[in-house]
Image (cartoon, grey):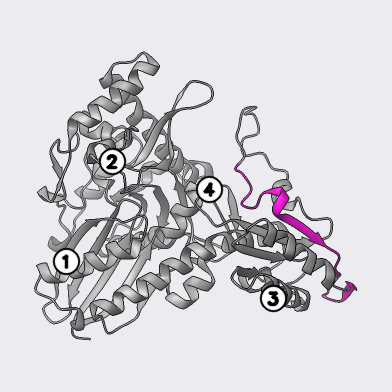
Amino acid sequence: MAGWRVGVDSGGTFTDLCLFEAGSGEVRVWKVPSTPADPSQAIADGVAAGLAEHGGAAGAVAYLGHGTTVATNALIQGRTARTGLITTLGFRDLLEIGRQKRPDLYDLQTDKPDPIVPRRLRLEVPERLRHDGRVEVPLDEAAVRRAAEALAAEGVQSVAIGFLYAFLNPAHEARAREIVAAVLPEAFISCSHEIAPEFREYERFSTVAVNAALGPVMSRYVRRLEDRVAALGVPVPAHITQSNGGVISTRLAAAQPVRTVLSGPATGVVGAVALSALTQIPDIITFDMGGTSTDVSLVRASRPDTSGEATVHGHPLKLPMLDIHTVGAGGGSIAHIDTGGLLKVGPHSAGADPGPACYARGAEAVTVTDANVALGILHPTHLLGGRMPIDRSLSLRALEKLGATLSLSMEATAQGVLAIVTANMAKAIRVISVQRGHDPRGFALMAFGGAGRSTPRGWRASLTARAFWSRRIPACCAPRACCSPIW
């Protein structure tokens, strides 16, 4: 198909675009700072600026594909909608009880993630279905109405409905939805039989609760994106990548945002798999480090691992998706002192606004980017090829202030920040490799993403990067500054 094919990766810190001109086969890339308050603004600005820079027109766009981290970042940073849950009598605490598995069996200080719905917003109603879907206890509609009114009084924006065995007989959930919608007409309502119609109630309830918590966030985003794309004059609708690597319409993404929790990371894995096949390097570990998170995945025989369920930031999700492990470690991850007086990095991120201290937008917290700027790993005066000026002195000042709390020098503090974030990312790689019985020495590390070029040197011993580049690679894929890791 003639015209421009545009791919957009909307991250928490930067928004990246790839423009492919079908007639000539030319590929162009463009990068702009993200706009966290309204990510669609950066997408529209980036598409317009990228096309203008390379002589394209919005009307000539034949396809617009879009990987987004809106849902991922909202979940990692806890910036979800105020959500209530209506469930079967006796199952109010299921989201916290889970399967009674400790994240770390021998760690007495381990921190469990906060439930996506706090206990006071989890309400029970009498109803019960048998294991074969037959009704044991009819739905108490008056109780559902009282629960909806209680959630309305709490100011919830979204409501999740999860009943036992609803995947066999959705009648109770469907009727509960009607009642809740009458009481809360503006609320986002999500039923478990629509999102994860499978057995295992804990994972199903967790999935629908996450979907409900992300619903208002993604709905607002999608509406703005559609308006801005249309205003540019782009004649085709946008498509959004889902967690299994495929694409869905913006309308489905708004209704089932949990499908996009690994949207951005999945897109990177799909591209890495294509490059793996092209370069005849079948076994790789993908490493996608952006401004807010780091995503890793293991690929064998040029095929990514897939899963019917996964845990994202402590929340089990029962959906088909690429097997990607995500941690809150990126260029914008904030360094802070925990309750024990120790230095920690992430999962909260400075994002693009105000961003790291060196952006000179009023931020004073130290980020991974500030540590890199202070130590000379990143350019001290600008980013994006000179289009984005930065101030190194602000990074130094923030590091000195944090270092004083720890009785460390600026250099030692910066090195400590990098050491901690490196350990967090190395742990993520161990999760998908060693802990699953794979020897990472037999895999090539494929680093990409905005911060992928600054891959820590310490991983050279554990990953055969030199083998990656020493094999015969087609000329079109020769290592370049934009894709080769720095060792």
Residue corresponding to mark 3 = 182
Q: Are marks 4 and 3 in contact (CB under 8 Å)?
A: no
Q: Is residue 351 above or below residue 372?
A: below
Q: As shown in the figure, which amino acid type bears the numbered disc 1?
A: Ala
Q: Mark 3 is on which residue type?
A: Ala
Q: Which residues are magenta?
A: 113-137
Tag 4: Cα neighbours inside 10 Å, few (<14), some, or many (≥20)? Answer: some
> Is residue 213 located in the magenta-colored stretch of the structure?
no
Instruction: Quote the CA–CA distance across marks 2 and 4.
Output: 23 Å
Q: Which residue is under mark 4? A: 313
Q: Which of pointers 2 and 3 lies earlier in the amino acid sequence?
A: 3
Q: Quadrant of residue 162?
A: bottom right
Kind of residue indicated by mark 2 = Thr
Q: Secondary structure at mark 1?
A: helix
First-in-chain label (4 vs 1): 1
Q: Choose between 417 and 32: the one closer to the eye.
A: 32
Q: CA distance from mark 1 to mark 2?
A: 29 Å
